[in-house]
């Protein structure tokens, strides 16, 4: 196992600054999720750690050793990509054993590692099948198994679940997390899905346009987002914002800042809330157990939360209020949390 450190790391592709001065320490045994929108530099950061991409400036280290000039195979890492390709003509066992055989690992050791991985991943009964005879989820587990049998210092995963359907994705993300807690191998996991990030990471690093916006536990990012970008990215539905002008026109106490409101902090009007505010229902998202109402107020749209099924229709005027202690304030210019 090993600590991983990015120390002021840059990556330029010609004029494109894919990663800009990334500094991030990942503790030994930690599960770190890199999350951010498309093009934010997540894969580039991971590929620099893997040695598949050179570093323009700064240092990447694994286990206390700067690896900038160390070849990928010497870094003792194992990667799982979105497009994991299993060898179709080989059995599952041979797929798992392939990399170890190439590294001249003794046969008894290969059998031990494959056996252990098969047990952890619950694919013991599939070892003699060919990939074409597996379901998507089973094939995904075999791909994970291939990384697992390497017993590396660090696991690197780049959107490994994005080929799976929603139900299988939820299930497999639980399995990966359980697995990692069991083996405690330092893991860097890339996703653009904030739900995946929130449910899997010990900590989450939020990237935007090559810049690390914030790193922290899921709770910290949810409760204390450092800026509007993180506030709007983490949470589902996301935090919505009342611009200062709207806040002023509504008679809210603070009008020098954009006010960030999570859905659970905007509720139908009752005493004890801040308000009442009035707005027009723009959309109704009824999920059964809960309903989210998009409500237009002045030049802003807030998401209002209701338990169960809401009795509201698009175009209707509703009265609602805000939970004062849930509100977050952001600088209208820089977007920084105040
Ligand atoms: N080989 C390359 N040559 C030129 N530009 C590149 C190269 N690889 C990546 N980029 C650019 O670097 C930026 C970051 O790309 P990267 O693949 O790291 O993003 P990402 O966060 O992984 O996005 P996604 O969620 O879409 O996978 C993008 O603007 C991308 O176009
Ligand atoms: Mg990517």
Image (cartoon, rainbow, N blue to C red):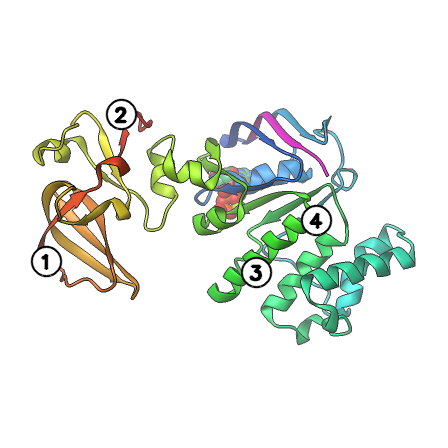
Q: Secondary structure at mark 2?
A: loop
Residue 134 location, x and y as percent? 65, 73
Residue 333's disc number: 2
Residue 257 location, x and y as percent? 22, 27
Is 27 situated left or right of 241 in this image?
A: right
Q: Would residue 55 be seen by someone viewing this image from the given angle?
A: no
- Earlier in the chain: of badge 2 and badge 1, it is 1
Q: Residue at x 44, y 48 (%)?
A: 194
Work out whether 50 lies above or below 90.
Answer: above
- Earlier in the chain: of badge 2 and badge 4, it is 4
Q: From the image, tell me which residue sits under label 1.
A: 315
User: Which residues fall within the magenta stretch?
Assistant: 1-11
Label 2 with label 1: CB-CB less than 8 Å:
no
Q: From the image, tell me which residue sits under label 4.
A: 183
Q: Residue at x 44, y 35 (%)?
A: 209
Identify which residue, 216 or 144, lies in the foreground. Answer: 216
Q: From the image, tell me which residue sits under label 3.
A: 172
- Magenta span: predominant SS is strand
Residue 139 location, x and y as percent? 65, 66
Residue 324 position by quadrant: top left
Quadrant in which the N terminus appears:
top right
Structural distance between the alpha carbons of marks 2 and 1: 32 Å
Work out whether 167 lies above or below 296.
Answer: below
């Amino acid at each position: 196992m090993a600590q991983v450190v990015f120390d002021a790391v840059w990556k330029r592709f010609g004029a494109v600054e894919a990663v800009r001065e990334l500094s991030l320490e990942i503790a030994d045994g930690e599960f770190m999720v890199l999350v951010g929108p498309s093009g934010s530099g997540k894969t580039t950061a991971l590929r620099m750690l893997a040695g598949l991409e050179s570093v323009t400036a700064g240092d990447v280290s694994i286990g206390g050793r700067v690896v900038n000039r160390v070849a990928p195979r010497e870094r003792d890492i194992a990667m799982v990509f979105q497009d994991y390709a299993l060898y179709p003509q080989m059995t599952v066992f041979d797929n798992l054993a392939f990399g170890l055989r190439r590294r001249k690992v003794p046969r008894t050791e290969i059998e031990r590692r494959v056996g252990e991985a098969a047990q952890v991943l619950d694919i013991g009964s599939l070892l003699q099948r060919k990939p074409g005879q597996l379901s998507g989820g089973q094939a995904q587990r075999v791909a994970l198994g291939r990384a697992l049998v390497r017993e590396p210092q660090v696991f690197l995963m780049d959107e490994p679940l994005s080929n799976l359907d929603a139900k299988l994705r939820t299930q497999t993300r639980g399995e990966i997390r359980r697995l990692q807690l069991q083996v405690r191998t330092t893991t860097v996991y890339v996703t653009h899905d904030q739900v995946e990030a929130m449910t899997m990471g010990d900590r989450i690093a939020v990237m935007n346009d090559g810049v690390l916006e914030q790193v922290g536990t899921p709770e910290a990012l949810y409760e204390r987002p450092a800026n509007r970008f993180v506030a709007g990215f983490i949470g589902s539905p996301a935090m919505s914002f009342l611009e200062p002008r709207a806040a002023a026109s509504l008679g809210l106490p603070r009008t020098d800042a954009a006010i960030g409101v999570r859905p659970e902090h905007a509720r139908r009007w009752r005493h004890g809330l801040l308000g009442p505010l009035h707005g027009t229902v723009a959309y109704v998202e009824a999920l059964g157990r809960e309903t989210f109402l998009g409500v237009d107020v002045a030049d802003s749209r807030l998401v209002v939360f209701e338990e169960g099924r809401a009795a509201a229709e698009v175009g209707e005027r509703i009265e609602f209020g805000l939970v004062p202690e849930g509100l977050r304030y952001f600088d209208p210019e820089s977007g920084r949390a105040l």
